[in-house]
Amino acid sequence: MFNKLISRLLPFMPKKLVWLFSRKYIAGETIDDAIRVCHALNGAGMMITIDLLGEFIARLEEATDYKNTYLEIVDRVEADHINGNYSLKPTMFGLLIDEEVCYQNIREIVAKAASHNNFVRVDMEDSQCTDREIKLFRRLKKEFPKNVGLVFQAYLKRTLQDIRDLKDLHTADNPLNFRLCKGIYVEPEAIAYKKYGEINEHFLKDLDYIFQEGIYPGIATHDKALVEGTCELITRHKVPKENYEFQMLYGVTPELRKSILDAGHRMRVYVPFGKDWFGYSTRRLKENPKMASHIIKAIFVEG
């Protein structure tokens, strides 16, 4: 109850107060902030994926602005020789307003990244977007087979079948590339697993299938039990280290992240930045009220 109360009050708190919590998990407001963080992570042996904050726009003019900003981000990241790629959310390019406009916006970004032999990850959002985002990925994958990937959420009951249904796009030369995470959106029990054990069980089932089929996974988790389960699957299937990577959010579980790196696994860190950090922070808290304890610590201990 306390955590839920804090999550409801947070949007009405002063932004400077919220930033005490948010600064640990967000690179900053500007591309300069993000580039600084990316260089530091690269220097510590980690790859990155850079993400401009924003989602669920109301006007298509906003989509154009986001597209142009992403094109500038690609130019800057490539010029600075960052070891990393790009993640984006289709709803910030108009997915729920006009699917074709959204596709053309994202296609332009993927084409720009592909011109640098780089890669764009299409994030998966809430369940109203799932079919649309799979359709979007199919179109992009056919034109840019080496330069685009998708995200799947293990808590959705449909996920394993969705992965199987995309197998027709998978070849030895151009393997599918999926980020697998637990999932953060609040979904009805009819379509999503709710219990911790169930979600972990299906995460590992999905990953087991991915390894069997030679699909390249970004294993996105901060759960030690899932890291251990993943390592068992890697050993069982004798997966070469270049055929998978772990992924974590910037600022989250740094000790576990270091232990994975020290064990010789590849690690990619998701680096969010942008002026929409306040909206991002409050939305994430509503989705996961347990984070309220971290806010209290930030305000009264670190602040």
Image (cartoon, rainbow, N blue to C red):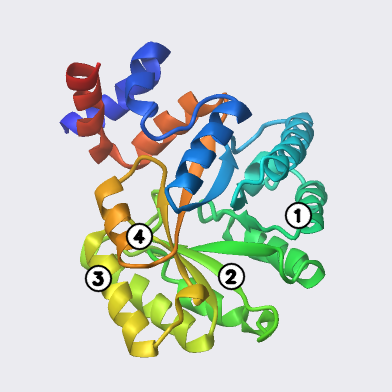
* C-alpha separation, residue under disc 4 versus residue under disc 3: 14 Å
Residue occupying the point 62% across, 30% down: 31
| Proximity of marks 4 and 3: CB atoms separated by less than 8 Å | no
**Label 4 Cα neighbours within 10 Å, binned few <14 / some 14-19 / many ≥20:** some
Quadrant where the image shows the C terminus: top left
**Label 2 Cα neighbours within 10 Å, binned few <14 / some 14-19 / many ≥20:** many
**Label 3 Cα neighbours within 10 Å, binned few <14 / some 14-19 / many ≥20:** few
Mark 2 = which residue? 177
Q: Earlier in the sequence, mark 4 or mark 3?
A: 3
Q: Earlier in the sequence, mark 4 or mark 2?
A: 2
Task: Indicate the secondary structure of the residue bearing disc 3.
Answer: helix
* C-alpha separation, residue under disc 4 versus residue under disc 2: 21 Å
* C-alpha separation, residue under disc 1 versus residue under disc 4: 29 Å
Quadrant where the image shows the N terminus: top left
Q: Amino acid at mark 1?
A: Val
- Depicted 206 relative to depicted 31: above or below: below
Indicate the position of residue 239 as horizontal and vertical percent values.
Answer: 43, 83
Q: Quadrant of residue 5?
A: top left
Q: Nearer the viewer, residue 294 or 3?
A: 294
Whether residue 53 appears in this view of the structure is no
Mark 1 = which residue? 110
Residue occupying the point 36% across, 70% down: 203
Mark 3 = which residue? 228
Q: Quadrant of residue 24?
A: top left
Mark 4 = which residue? 261
Q: Is residue 130 left or right of residue 61?
A: left
Residue occupying the point 45% across, 32% down: 26
Q: Amino acid at mark 3?
A: Glu
| Proximity of marks 3 and 1: CB atoms separated by less than 8 Å | no
Task: Indicate the secondary structure of the residue bearing disc 2.
Answer: strand
